[in-house]
Every structure is written in C-alpha cells, then in structure tokens.
Image: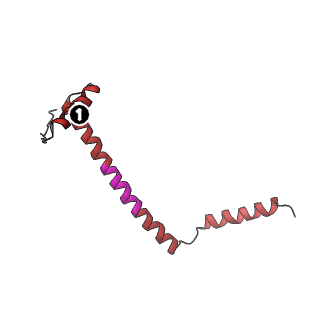
Amino acid sequence: MATTTARLEARISPETRELLRRAAELQGRSLSDFVVSAAQDAALRVIFERELLQLALDDQQRFAESLLAPAEPADALRHAFARRRTLINTDSPA
C-alpha cells in the first residue's frame, strides 16, 4: 500500500527554529517529526475542547428543557418508590 504525504511550509524566526530543533533533539526526533507531532496534538486538543464545549451547551439546553417540562415517571419508578415507602415505614421505630 502506497503512503501519500502532503507538504506543509511555514516561515518562522531563527529563534523559534532553534527552540523547536532543541526540543526535537531532546526527544530524539527529527525536526519535521517533532513539529508534525506537536501540530497534531494541538489540533486534536482544539477539536476535543470545541466538541466538548458544544456537547456541554447541548446538554445544558436538554437539562433546562427537562426541568421546565419534566416527563411523567414510568410505572417501574412508581413501583420502586412505593416499595421504598413500604420498607422505610416498616423499618422506622413507632
């Protein structure tokens, strides 16, 4: 299976290049490998944070809607509460 690649170029200051080169060297990686890996990590973090924030906003909306218009309890929940009431009344001192 053939691997395809795409080229990415960026203009950076000599100081930034030296910083990246040094970090790559400390990890025993090539400069290209270090930069690509760091960019991937940053991209995944941004996407995750955005999707998490969006999900949180959607969940907030659903929560508010359920507070304003709660669903009727199911029969199983009614039976569970009735059973609980019976157990609590039986166990409590008279």
Q: Residues within 10 Å of mark 1 (few under 14, many from 20)?
A: few
Residue 73: x, y in percent?
58, 69
Q: On the image, which quarter does residue 7 sit in?
A: top left
- For label 1, the residue is 19
Q: Residue 39: which quarter of the image?
A: top left
- Farthest-out residue, top: 28
User: Which residue is the extreme one toward the right?
Assistant: 94
Q: Position of residue 20 (x, y in %)?
A: 22, 34
Residue under the image location 50 percent in, 70 percent down:
66
Image height check: is 47 above or below 65? above
Q: Is residue 27 visible?
A: no
Q: Identify the residue at horizontal 66%, vertical 62% (top origin).
A: 80
Closer-to-camera residue (87/5): 5
Query: In the rendered structure, which segment of residues is drawn in magenta?
Result: 46-57
Specify the color scheme: secondary structure
On whether residue 45 falls in the magenta region, the answer is: no
Residue 17, image x and y in percent?
18, 35
Tell whether 19 sits left or right of 56: left
Decide if residue 62 is in sight here. Answer: yes
Residue furthest to the bottom:
69
The image quarter containing residue 88 is bottom right
Image quadrant holding the N terminus, namely top left
Residue closest to the eye, 90 or 26 = 26
Q: How many marks?
A: 1
The residue at the point 71 percent across, 62 percent down is 84
